Amino acid sequence: MGAEKIIIDCDPGQDDAINLLLAMSSPAELEILGITTVAGNVPLEFTQRNARLICDVADRGDMRVYAGCPRPMVRPLLTAEKVHGGTGIDGIEVGTPKQPLQQRHAVDFIVDTLLAADDASITLVPTGPLTNIAMAIVKDPSILAKVRRIVLMGGAMREGGNFSPSAEFNILVDPHAAQVVFECGRPLVVMGLDVTHQVIATRERVARIAALANPAALATAGMLGFFNRHDSKKYGYEGAPLHDPCTVAWLLCPELFDGHDCNVVVETASPLTMGHTAVDFWGVTGRRPNATWVHAVDADGFYDLLVERIGRYST
């Protein structure tokens, strides 16, 4: 069996950036058809630039980066500079990327790529607000037959919310898009805060990465050095949770994770709980499961994987 064909949709963000590095280090397992960007952690002009900069860090001039939607489907854009810094990837030097931006809109790229593919052959890996994915589904619902599965970062159950009392950031930014995706009928694997808060970037783990001393490792350690300061203060952790790389780590080593099939519904009406993911973990509603809700991870195994893959980049 060949490498799994994927499209990564992201809003870099330090953790999105590290997820890209993890994916690009693994060509035997993952064939990246394209990287699409969306407004989220920072506005679109920065997320598309950041994705291209990370391709430069990885020395992957073969990657193709597409800019997508600059705002959510319905609500005004909410960003997270207080977490990620003004550039979105504070902690490394940010300049003009060598990697060019593709001219096609990300939504058009997603639609066209899926339409040209075999049925159930492409995995979508969204790690930001789900605007691009939802807009592609709305534009041409026939693409869904081509989707193998959607492995996404978003939502929360036992952990509550990180940008409101009950909502995780990616879902809160565009709950209407999330609703479209959760109702799309394709297999979903969901990495919410319940699992991502278990993969803490402690000083010891960051030091292991830094000791690799290649450009990708130094960039990863630099970004984590900045990223850690916010969540360490907020949660009292020894470091920040490394959210988005859980998606690619699951694709590479699903045995590191535990998940439970259940029904997930997104709140789109209540001002108090907007973006809340109502996870019917115990099946009390009788609604058909629409997602695998990942709730546990071998954190040491996760960081062993990350260190090994980042170590593949040349010095």
Image (cartoon, rainbow, N blue to C red):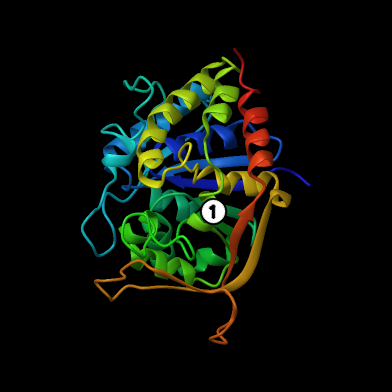
Residue at image coords 29%, 31%: 87
Q: Quadrant of residue 100?
A: top left
The image shows residue 5, relative to residue 207, as above or below, that is below
Q: From the viewer's perspective, is 210 left or right of 135? A: right
Q: Residue furthest left?
A: 76
The image quadrant where one finds the C terminus is top right
Closer to the camera, 196 or 43?
Answer: 196
Residue at image coords 57%, 74%: 281
Question: Of the residues shown, which amino acid type is indicated by label 1?
Answer: Leu
Judging from the image, what secondary structure is the residue with disc 1 in?
strand
Closer to the camera, 215 or 37?
Answer: 215
Residue 89 visible to an observer of this rendering: yes
Residue 147 visible to an observer of this rendering: no
Percent across and percent down for residue 200 are 53, 41
The image shows residue 60, relative to residue 271, as above or below, that is above
What residue sits right under mark 1 in the picture?
124
